[in-house]
Amino acid sequence: MSLLEVRGLRVAYGSGAGAVAAVRGVDLSLDAGRKLGIAGESGCGKSTLALALLRLLPPTARLSGEVLLDGEDVLTMRWGRLRAVRWAGASIVFQGAMHSLNAVRGVGDQIAEPVLLHQRVTRAAARRRAGELLELVGLPAGRAGSFPHELSGGQRQRVMIAMALACGPRLIVADEPTTALDVMIQAQILGLIGGLVTERGIGLLMISHDLAVLADVCDRLAVMYAGRVVEEGPAGAVYTAALHPYGRALSAAFPRVGDSASRRAPRGLPGDPPDPAALPGGCAFRPRCPEALAVCAEAEQELTGDGGHRAACVRVAAPGGEGRA
């Protein structure tokens, strides 16, 4: 049994104009000790998916489907059980550590808080545990008394990772964990996260708009567009040989080291993801797709492919691109 199984997950937000679908039938699987990356532009549903895994969405959100954590459905848990699972069963590293940490409390106290809540130890033991966790993520235990504004961006992100590890969770969800960090600090943070996953045998679900970063860190990648997974497969294959036109566009948007042609003319993608309240008919990517066929306007494609690498594209479903032009 997988550590995490997401089956047919749908998330819709209530609005004055009716329900707006942000996540539309996502299926994912993650084993312990493995790393799954979720890629896509802003507005594709990545963060909504991350928050839905622990039911951290606002009251206006309506969820359906299944989120099985060690076989137990998070979406049907009673409040007391859900409260116990958060931190101890699964935890989340939010993007923007400065906004996620309490500005008027020392970081050691913030790390110790979930330990006190879930492990029922003394305050002295919780403070010792906070110091151990800081050292685990590469910070001196003496920084426990520091306030968030006294730490650099990379140090604050390390504090967030220490908090996520505080109660020994089986799953960590990292939502853009290196946002706004310089490339050297980003590499250190990503190396730290990857090492902890391997050493502790936990599962990591990491979200980013940067396909190159995810390909370097994760075992498998899932590409989201307009609330759906449009491609899923081994990280290297998705990054270097994407099957879906959107996956290829994401990969091509980043210049490759040693490739002078891509450095001089990195390829982007015109336009933006569609408004969830006004999705086009058929394939949601069709209005931006340089390879669209007439059949693409008729219906959205399901994930299709061989060898564990699948894409929701009519050209994958019909090899060679056969179809009505």
Image: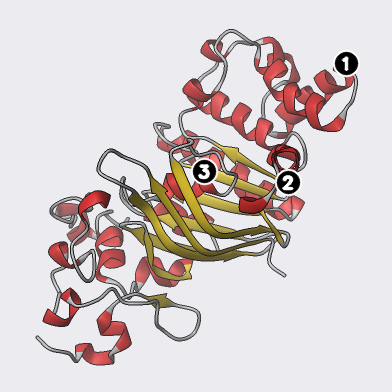
Q: Residue at x 69, y 47 (%)?
A: 196
The three-letter amino acid code for the residue at tag 1 is Ala
Camera-side residue of 96 and 21:
21
Residue 163 position within the rendered picture, expressed as x and y whole percent measured from the top left: 67, 31
In terms of depth relative to the viewer, which is nearer, 120 or 218?
120
Image: 86 above or below 205: above
Q: In the image, is 75 to the left or to the right of 89?
A: left
Tag 1 or tag 3, which sits nearer the N-term?
3
Q: Secondary structure at mark 1?
A: helix
Q: What's the amino acid at mark 2?
A: Gly
Residue drawn where x is 46% and y is 36% of the image: 184
Distance between the Cα atoms at labels 3 and 2?
15 Å
Against 17, is 103 above or below? Answer: above
Does residue 269 appear to the left or right of 48 in the view shown? left
Residue 138: name its quadrant. top right
Q: N-terminal of the two: label 2 or label 1?
A: 2
Secondary structure, mark 3, is helix
The answer to whether 289 is drawn above or below residue 88 in the figure is below
Q: Is residue 56 left or right of residue 46?
A: right
Considering depth in this image, is 55 or 256 the residue closer to the camera?
55
Q: Amino acid at mark 3?
A: Leu
Q: Which residue is mark 2?
A: 89
* Residue occupying image coordinates x 69% and y 61%: 3
Task: Indicate left or right for 214 with 157 as reference.
Answer: left
* Residue depth check, mark 2 versus mark 1: number of the one nearer the observer: 2
Label 1 neighbourhood size at 10 Å, few (<14), some (14-19), many (20+)?
A: few
Residue at which label 1 appears: 124
> Where does the C terminus fall, quadrant-wise?
bottom left
